[in-house]
Amino acid sequence: MPPPRPHSPKPRRHTAFRKTLAPLALGTLLVGTLGVGSAAASQEEDPGPVRVSGAENAVDRTEIARTGVSIDLVEDDGTLLATASPGEVEEITDLGYGVADASPSVEAMHPDDGYTSYPEVVEHVEGLVAEYPDLAHSEVYGQSHEGRDLVAVRISDDPGVDQDEPEVLFTHSQHAREPLTVEMAVHIMDMLTEGYGSDERITELVDTREIWIVPNANPDGTEYDQSGDTWQNWRKTREPNEGSDALGTDMNRNWAHEWGCCGGSSGDPESSTYRGHAPESATEVEALADFVRSREVDGEQQITTAIDFHTFGELVLWPFGHTYDETTDGMNQDEYDTHQALGELMAGSNGYTPQQSSDLYITDGSINDWLWADQGIVNFTFEMYPSSPGDGGFYPPSDVIEEETARNEEPVLDLLGYADCPYRVIGEEETYCG
Ligand code: 0X9
Ligand code: CA
Ligand code: ZN
């Protein structure tokens, strides 16, 4: 069954085009916005891409993030690419940083058919399960706000039943405007099923692990992002917020560990890093958190390791995000060292930069912090290709998909390999897995 189409009016324009196309589009705009006054008014405040100069370190970046902007990239010279509303631009300017418009080129903004849409990913999963019933099994773990199925795929030998094997979780597209991460999910599913029986390493891993793939954690956001003549640069979910015209929550600020603690998210629904009105208030976060909790069998969380895929920046990140400290309540030295060693190992294969997540800027309510602190899962955020906005930012041309997803085969297989005892990576398997 195809998911219901959202009924919200299509956006008339995109922030990125306001400056260049405004005079030209004025006539259409007036006609186009008749009768949708409030929606049009809220779009005036839609966050758009900006370039921020003058930030020198993670503390500066956190100060900037605290205004509510999403920091989308830290460039080598310290310049930031961010998504900011007009109000946030003013705040950053008041803090003494430079802000310039960073609208991407028109060509770069056309949705690219080479990407896998949400309906296509559902179809791909159905095809996979039909072709490899002995290796792949799909489950609907909930419904998005707009009623789309939230899908998880289990790949293992005997995938329909729960075996006593270490489980690994790959999550994709918490952020709608990161479509390359959905391609990563497709690549992992294809690699594991096609490689089974011919590739010895893959066969062994599929036989001895249960591998969960959530190919799109935020389908409403993705469908909206791909709904117009241009990509919509949309990050959040699409659920209405009480008392505001602004839609959606930043899923990666809505998780229930130290939610909203540390200036790493926004309390303003207009912001692209809005944390929601309560932990797990976003329908899609609650459903995914429930799914993770459901993997606790006989008091033991079966999932041992995880990667949450994002774009962009080519980074491997590990918890915590809510504090600059490496060790703290809920993260001792061995635990930190295990994350660091595994992160560095994986970065050694894909060429990404490995670092603690707060080295970038403080985030609170991220999935990483919750998976570790609440569920004890050794886990990472991958920020995939590109490393610079010049290569397409969130929307690189689809002809990079094959190369940039294949680039993560080795790290994914490495992580699967350590899933029986991640502490082996620091030589402490006796202590923790004996
Ligand atoms: O800010 C985010 O949510 C991630 N970056 S993105 O540009 N894809 O939005 C980074 C999250 C890293 N922080 C933690 N994992 N704590
Ligand atoms: Ca199991
Ligand atoms: Zn992201």
Image: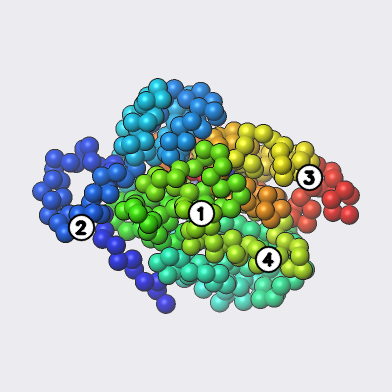
Residue at numbered disc 2: 36
**Label 2 – label 1 distance at C-alpha:** 29 Å
Name which of mark 3 and mark 1 comes first in the sequence: 1
Q: Which mark is residue 66?
A: none
* Type of the residue with mark 2: Val
Report whether residue 29 is seen: yes
Picture residue at 76% right of the left edge, 41% below the top: 332
**Label 4 – label 3 distance at C-alpha:** 24 Å
Instruction: Give the secondary structure at mark 4.
Output: loop
Crowding at mark 2 (Cα within 10 Å: few <14, some 14-19, many 20+): few
Some atom of ligand 2 lies within 8 Å of the CB belonging to the residue at label 4? yes
* Type of the residue with mark 4: Arg
Q: Which mark is residue 295?
A: 4
Picture residue at 34% right of the left edge, 52% below the top: 244
Instruction: Give the secondary structure at mark 2.
Output: loop
Residue at numbered disc 3: 425
Q: Position of residue 239 (x, y in %)?
A: 40, 59
Q: Nearer the viewer, mark 4 or mark 2?
A: 2
* Furthest residue toward front: 243
* Quadrant hosting residue 360: top right
Image quadrant holding the N terminus, namely: bottom left
Name which of mark 3 and mark 2 comes first in the sequence: 2
Residue at numbered disc 1: 278
**Label 3 – label 1 distance at C-alpha:** 36 Å
Picture residue at 72% right of the left edge, 56% below the top: 304
Q: Are marks 4 and 1 in contact (CB under 8 Å)?
A: no
* Quadrant hosting residue 357: top right
Q: Above or below — where is 243 with respect to 145?
A: above
Some atom of ligand 1 lies within 8 Å of the CB belonging to the residue at label 2? no
Q: Position of residue 307 (x, y in %)?
A: 62, 51
Instruction: Give the secondary structure at mark 1.
Output: loop
Instruction: Give the secondary structure at mark 3.
Output: helix
